[in-house]
Amino acid sequence: MSTAYLTHPLCEEHKLGEDHPESPQRLEAIQNRLIAGQLMDFMRWREANEVTVEQLNATHDPNYVASIFAKAPEQGHVELDQETLMMPHTLDAALRASGAVVQAVDMIMSGEVQNAFCAVRPPGHHAEYDKAMGFCLFNNIAVGARHALNQHGIERIAIVDFDVHHGNGTEDIFKNDPQVLYASSYQHPLFPYPDPGASHDNIVHMPLEKGSKGEDFRAAYESELFPALDEFKPQLLMISAGFDALAEDPMGQLRLREDDIVWVTEKLMDVAERHCQGRVVSVLEGGYNTDALGRAVFSHLKAIMKL
């Protein structure tokens, strides 16, 4: 069994300006590192399909989805919120970003591949049921998870988010949904700022203070997450893979190293082997120092592929 790598050239056409951190160079840095390390030779590279409106409506408010289509500009830009802009090609990129995760789920559930990584942008985990924010239009990983629940007979999905920012959108979509366990480690306080509160029901919160290092990150996962995953017994494991918790990243003040990313990936792969028949979908979220991003994704994928 192999690993799928899903992306699309249109994801690089979403251009927010030379100084914007959420830039096309993020995907270029990942691809260049994978090619240089000859890892691409061991993966099944696929161009992502477009997500359908029906698939988006299964996750988001249909009125919200329609409004995003209606606002897409042919020139200039449209401001959805202070951080989230639509430019020409933004909608095209967003449709491929969510479509990649749906396609990854289909490839895994059909047995074509064992696991997948979606190198896509714009990211998704801040997009709520009816609201764009934090660079995110559609919640890519949530769209893929809902597709797995609705179309593939999956009854329990775990989504683990190690981005430096809390994935408020994913929590908003799946709060009180017993079929989805959502777990998020994040720097607090930091965008999106409001305290998300204590863990409850199907939500696991692992807040980390500014300056927290790998040992703090690992302790939170050992004490909070892994016992919850073993109790939940997911049938599919999905990862919101944000690499902005690394020490080099300008968007946060956590101090994770590349080996912390490898550690958590290996641990999650062990969980997937125990409960999910090894089925894992990892989806790019944050990560804005392109050198660190390329290296960390390379190491993350090596751990997924057990190389």
Image (spheres, rainbow, N blue to C red):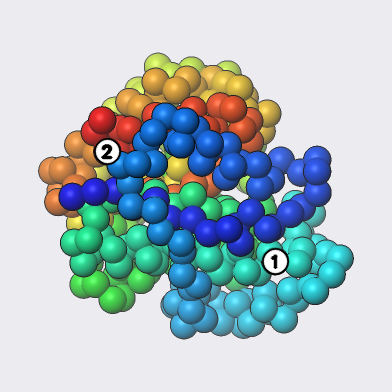
Q: Quadrant of residue 155?
A: bottom left
Nearest the eye: 135 or 90 = 90
Q: Amino acid at mark 2?
A: Met
Q: Residue at x 27, y 38 (%)?
A: 305
Residue 89, numbered label:
1
Nearest the eye: 301 or 251 = 301
121 in relation to 226, above or below:
below
Residue 206, numbered label:
none
Q: Residue at x 47, y 20 (%)?
A: 257
Q: Residue at x 58, y 58 (%)?
A: 9
Q: Quadrant of the C terminus?
A: top left
Q: How many numbered discs?
A: 2
Q: Quadrant of residue 85?
A: bottom right
Q: Amino acid at mark 1?
A: His
Q: Position of residue 140 (x, y in %)?
A: 49, 61
> Is residue 127 visible from the viewing direction of this image?
no
Dot 2 corresponds to which residue? Answer: 305
Q: Position of residue 262 (x, y in %)?
A: 35, 27
Q: Earlier in the sequence, mark 1 or mark 2?
A: 1
Q: Residues within 10 Å of mark 2 (few under 14, many from 20)?
A: some
In the image, 18: left or right of 136?
A: right
